[in-house]
């Protein structure tokens, strides 16, 4: 049997369009591929994506004193009045700590003070997944939603088996603006943890010490929440994380640079 390939002149022209907004203190970009990227339903979906991310920022930002989480921690809002997402994130943080053997935690120890709850390391990936759900119902599109290098890639109805792959570059942590490797993703998530962009900001929960070294860990898999968790754990302890991912998350692949 011989595959029949349509002549180039008969193939649909795939257009590309980008939307960008500053949310959570970073540029968040949405890239769409479709035959017609000017459709009204695509524009509405993009608006819904950014509205969802702004709502998450309103609820969880610890950089803002008026966010719901900041108000909860200040005692200005009681837990019973909080949005249901607050409890969902607490449960996910506890699960992540258990599944990583403590390599990932949302509770930070401060000398002379009680541990502080900071779910920032999990919330971003979770938020991007929530927002990406707005795109999966839009027919005839392929998308890449990127928040600071953490990405969800997918497509809408009618694109299974025909959605184009996205080529994702993994930045070389030792050479700014250089690409060390690439991965092809049609449906899934990519997360990277390291120190190049934000400096030494990741703490080893086992010791309380900041991880002071260069390099990065990138994880590709079906869920951005867990890809992000595994990437953080891998940067803290690459050897342990390799075993952990192989044992608990075989659907995920790890690149340590």
Image (cartoon, helix red, strand yellow):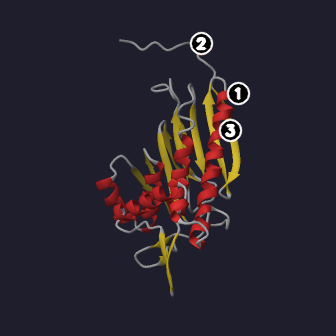
Marks 3 and 1, how far apart at CA: 11 Å
Name the quadrant of the N terminus: top left
- Residue under label 1, please give it: 38
Tell me residue 139's x, y (percent): 56, 26
What residue appears at the point 34 percent right and 67 percent down from the top-left corner?
Answer: 101
Out of 117 and 240, give the one closest to the viewer. Answer: 117
Out of 213 and 100, give the one closest to the viewer. Answer: 100
Marks 2 and 3, how far apart at CA: 26 Å
Q: For the view shown, which residue lies furthest in the bottom direction?
A: 112
- Residue under label 3, please give it: 18
Reading the chain from its start, which is encountered first: label 1 or label 2? 2
Reading the chain from its start, which is encountered first: label 3 or label 1? 3
- Residue under label 2, please give it: 10
Q: Nearer the viewer, mark 1 or mark 2?
A: 1
Q: Secondary structure at mark 3?
A: strand
Tell me residue 213's x, y (percent): 51, 72
Q: Secondary structure at mark 1?
A: loop
Could you classify mark 1 by the number of other residues whose Cα lies within 10 Å: few (under 14), some (14-19), or many (20 or more)?
A: few
Above or below: residue 192 compared with residue 43: below
Could you classify mark 2 by the number of other residues whose Cα lies within 10 Å: few (under 14), some (14-19), or many (20 or more)?
A: few
């Amino acid at each position: 049997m011989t595959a029949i390939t349509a002549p180039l002149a008969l193939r649909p022209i795939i257009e590309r369009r980008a939307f960008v907004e500053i949310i959570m203190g970073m540029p968040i970009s949405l890239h769409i591929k479709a035959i017609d990227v000017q459709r009204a339903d695509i524009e509405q979906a993009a608006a819904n994506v950014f509205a969802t991310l702004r709502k998450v920022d309103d609820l969880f930002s610890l950089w803002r004193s008026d966010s719901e989480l900041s108000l909860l921690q200040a005692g200005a809002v009681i837990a019973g009045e909080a949005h249901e997402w607050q409890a969902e994130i607490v449960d996910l943080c506890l699960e992540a700590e258990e599944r990583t053997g403590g390599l990932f935690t949302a509770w930070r120890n401060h000398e002379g003070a009680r541990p502080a709850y900071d779910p920032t390391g999990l919330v971003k990936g979770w938020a991007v997944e929530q927002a990406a759900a707005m795109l999966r119902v839009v027919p005839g599109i392929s998308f890449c939603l990127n928040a600071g290098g953490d990405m969800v890639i997918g497509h809408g109805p009618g694109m299974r088996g025909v959605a184009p792959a996205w080529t994702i570059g993994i930045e070389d942590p030792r050479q700014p603006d250089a690409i060390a490797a690439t991965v092809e993703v049609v449906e899934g998530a990519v997360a990277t943890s390291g120190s190049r962009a934000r400096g030494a900001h990741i703490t080893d929960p086992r010791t309380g010490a900041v991880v002071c070294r260069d390099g990065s860990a990138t994880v590709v898999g079906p869920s951005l929440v867990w890809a992000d968790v595994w990437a953080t754990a891998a940067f803290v302890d690459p050897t342990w994380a390799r075993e952990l991912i192989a044992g608990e998350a075989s659907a995920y692949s790890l690149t340590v640079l």
